[in-house]
Amino acid sequence: MVRRRALALISTFLAGTAAAQALDLAQIYQAARRHDMSYRESGASYREARTLAPAARSAFLPHISAQANSTYNDLTSRILGGTPGFTFPSGHFTFNSNGYGISVSEALLDIHALYAYQAAGRSVRAAAVRHALAKSELILAVCNRYFGFLLARDDLDLQRAEGRALHAEYARALRSFRLGRATITDANEARARYDAVRAEQVAAQNAVRLARARLERMTAGPAYGLWSLNLAAPLPRPRRGALSVYEAKARRENLVLQAARLEARVATAQARAAGAARYPTITAEAAYSYSRAGASEFGFGTVLHDKTIGIDLAVPIYQGGELSAQEARAAAAAFKARVAELRTAREVAFDVHEAFLNVRTGYRQIRALQAAEKAAQVALASERLGVRVGVRNNVDVLRAEQAYFRSRRNLARATYGYILSRLDLKAAVSHLTAGDIERVNARLLPPGGPAAQTGAGRAPGHGQRP
């Protein structure tokens, strides 16, 4: 009794430790945010784009510069000719000259800089949308890889359970043959089906390893003991609403379309800026300078104070065709961006349509597969009862068992697919957020939880009702 209690306590402790070390979807997502290179690259691109607006705004702010100089001069001069009655000194002079100054300029009219500033602001907004889109895509990728691993693991568990059931049927058929109650055909059929399932288990084990490797590549950490999906929990029904409602919402909120729209506007503003390079610019300038020289080539020194203020007008007349080439290139880029926006709008509409149909079809498919699983349970129980009363043989039981496990695998795949299709629909209509991760994470169960065996891990044994 004491030993049994000690073993129970040890088992409880180990189960609690495993559950504490297990990772759920939210933890996997946080690890992916820290280590996924695509998401981090998107963040770096956004930080880089944020520097465009201050650089473009600087064209409208005052430009102030200061300068100073100090020079040692060693000068030898000889004046040729001269004016009667006045002679310039000649000879060798050494002296210092120094000075300082400050200048201020500010653009009063610069159409080119105005359009460039508009393009920079739209570029920053487009980069922000692209960064939010990268976050949404990361959430969708994490969910796909997480559930891809769970599906592969559940499929392996179901195949193992099917293998155990077939092995039990094989042992039962072999005993019946030895007792003379059945033919060797039943035992051979059971052994053949069991060997086929064992071969499928090898492929399923490799699928689990690959799914785990894909998840670990995204998170740069181990992915063991992941929380399982509670397959017994009721699934959310599809939201009511016509397809046109989703399409209209996608035209307003889809991040891919918003980014393409902003990038088209950026290209249009850049084309306007290229055309405005032909316009004149007006700049206000003011300067002050002081200079002092101990001597000069004429022999005498100078002290100068210079104050200037004015307006500068610059009109580009001919730049060798450079302005025309830049304008043509910018116009072509703007047209390309508008075409890309139209293509993106069509792709988004198709993605919404596809995701909408997948959600509706997936829910109906799950309802049908649930009924098929119950029917397979009843059929398997009937076949086993038929064997006991002598109206069915072991081959009929084997077929019913494989049909039952096939229905369970199909139901598990459909359940995972339905949850992912709901995420696909929201991503196609708008975008995914951390709140979506939390809602999906609430449907998960820690390892060893009270309902952890409601999915693939539970399978009817030989002497049990399915």
Image (cartoon, rainbow, N blue to C red):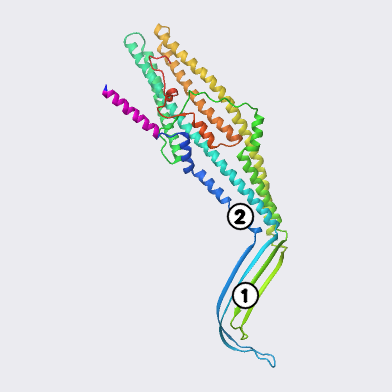
Q: Tell me the CA gap for discs 2 and 1.
A: 33 Å
**Residue shown at 36%/32% (left/top)?**
17
Residue type at numbered disc 2: Pro
Residue located beneath label 1 in the image: 290
**Residue furthest toward the left?**
2
Residue 67 magenta: no
Residue type at numbered disc 1: Tyr
For label 2, the SS is: helix
Residue 266 sits above or below residue 432 on the image: below
Residue 3 sits above or below residue 22 on the image: above
Q: Indicate which disc residue 335 carries.
A: none
Residue 391 sits above or below residue 75 on the image: above
Q: Residues within 10 Å of mark 1 (few under 14, many from 20)?
A: some
Residue 5 magenta: yes
Q: How many marks?
A: 2
Lateral position of residue 132 relative to residue 452, left or right: right
**Residue furthest toward the bottom?**
85
Question: Quarter of the image holding residue 14?
Answer: top left
Query: Contact, CB < 8 Å: mark 2 with mark 1?
Result: no
Give the main secondary structure of the magenta stretch.
helix
Lateral position of residue 290 relative to residue 173, left or right: right
Q: Position of residue 265 (x, y in %)?
A: 67, 47
Lateral position of residue 246 relative to residue 454, left or right: right
Q: Position of residue 433 (x, y in %)?
A: 55, 37
Q: Which residues are magenta?
A: 2-20
**Residue shown at 62%/38% (left/top)?**
254
Q: Nearer the viewer, residue 257 or 253?
A: 253
Q: Residues within 10 Å of mark 2 (few under 14, many from 20)?
A: few
Q: Position of residue 176 (x, y in %)?
A: 34, 11
Q: Indicate which disc residue 54 carries.
A: 2
If you read the primary sequence from the N terminus, does the residue marked by circle 2 or circle 1 appear first?
2
Q: Position of residue 267 (x, y in %)?
A: 66, 49
